[in-house]
Structures are given as structure tokens and as C-alpha cells.
Amino acid sequence: MKKPFIIAIDGASSTGKSTLAKGLAIALDMVYVDSGAMYRAVTFYAQQKSWLTLNGLDEAQLITHLDDIQLSFQQHKLYLNGVDVSSEIRSMEVSNAVSQVASISEVRAFLVAQQRIIGATHSVVMDGRDIGTVVFPNADLKLFLTADAKVRAQRRYKELKEQDTTVSLEQIEANITQRDHMDSTRDDSPLRQAKDAIVLDAMKYNVSEMLQHVLELVKQRKR
Ligand code: CDP
């Protein structure tokens, strides 16, 4: 079997990681894994079980029951114990709590193990916060996307409005700022640029220019 080719894309919220990752996966016939969706699904599960409420998180219960959580991607949809939760995991309720859940080392170890299994057998484009630093430190290509917080909030606002939610730009900005802070200051696998990552300013390219630029980088790596 040919060694899988791994592309790791990291960066803060709404920098366009998943748009780029999906485009690359289609163009290069690779598997796309949205690692953030996995953290969101664990968060949603904890909320369903009432271990996570506005009053706090029962970490011990969540950690004890991690093995009850089965996640699988099918046609870019995420299934949690056999149920498609792709829309539910995008709610503000989940967005506001996910960074807290993602700071738990046991949760990270549980999900990172699954992410590595996928990358062991498939050529993968994976996006997240720790893909180039922790999940695949030997990835063939590492990208780190950046953009101003205001631009990112606008971007996410447009996306969510298309799904007709009632969320305001202010709520999104607050959520992005809070997650930026929590994700980059946590002890376990904080959001960091890998030393060998190529930094791309997402504000400099439109979607197709970004894709073309990265396809060129992939070509150079494959040579
Ligand atoms: O879509 P968006 O960029 O807003 O976030 P996401 O990729 O869906 O990730 C949601 C949250 O999961 C992040 O804010 C992190 O707290 C966590 N996450 C993580 O800790 N490590 C990853 N590899 C991916 C996501």
C-alpha cells in the first residue's frame, strides 16, 4: 500500500480552513476530516446527557462515558451513535461550550487516537487546532491559516445566516474571541503554528485562489 499523504490545516475559528480542506479533498481525492466537528459532537453529547449545562460541566461523568461515544463521518456528515448531528453541532449552545470540553486531556486523547487511525490508512486532509503540532507532527504539508478576528466573525455570520439562524454578529464575535483565547491558552495541545507550517493569510486570497495556491504547494511536496 502507498504511504498515505497527510495535509494538516490549523488556525483559529472561521479562517476558511474547512472550505480549503474540502476543496483539496475533492481535487486530490483524499478523505476530509473536520476534527472540530468531533469536539463539537462530544460537547453535544455531554449536553444531551445533562453533564454539561449553563451551571457547569461534570467532567468525571463525561470522561467515564467517553467510550459510549461513537463517531463516524459519512459523505461529510458526522454521525454520533448512528444519528446525523451535523446541524446540531453548529448551534451557539455547542459553540459556547466546546472550548471547555476540548481543554480536557482525556477528551483530546480519545479523539486524537481516532484521528490518527484514519490517517494511518487513508490520505487525509484534516483541519483543526493541533493537527500539525500533535495529531500528525510528520504531516507531508502543514498549513496555518490566519485572518483578523473581525473578518472571521463576518465570515461566520454570513455562513450562519444562510442557515437562517437568529444569531447576531455581536454574539459571534464574542464567541470567536472567547474561543481564540481558550484554545490558545489551554495546557494540552494549545492552538499553535507548527514550526514547519506554511502561514497563509486568508484575507489575501479568495476561495479559488487559495485552493490553487495550495494545490501548487502539494505538487511541489509530491515531486
Ligand atoms: O468551525 P470553527 O473554526 O468555529 O471551529 P471548529 O473547527 O468546529 O472547532 C470547534 C472547537 O473545537 C475549537 O474552538 C476548539 O476548542 C476545538 N478543537 C480543538 O481543540 N482541536 C481541534 N483539532 C479542533 C477543534
Image (tube, grey):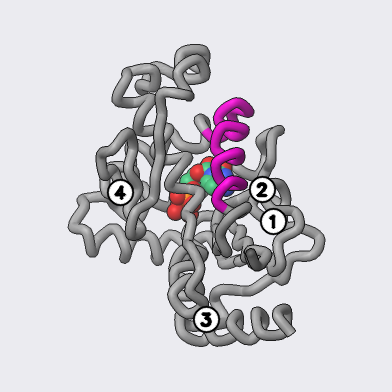
- 81 vs 196, left or right, is left
- Residue 43, given in percent of the width and then of the height, sits at 41, 32
Task: Write the residue at 33% across / 59% down.
Answer: 75
**Mark 1 sits on what residue?**
132
Disc number at residue 135? 2
How far is the residue under mark 2 from the one under mark 4? Answer: 23 Å
Residue type pointed to by label 2: Val
Disc number at residue 86? 4
Crowding near the residue tagged with mark 1, few <14, some 14–19, many ≥20 C-alpha atoms within 10 Å: many
The secondary structure making up most of the magenta span is: helix
Residue type pointed to by label 3: Leu
User: What is the magenta range?
Assistant: 102-118
Q: Quadrant of residue 10?
A: bottom right
Task: Write the residue at 70% across / 80% down.
Answer: 222
**Mark 3 sits on what residue?**
211
Crowding near the residue tagged with mark 2, few <14, some 14–19, many ≥20 C-alpha atoms within 10 Å: many
How far is the residue under mark 1 from the one under mark 2? Answer: 6 Å
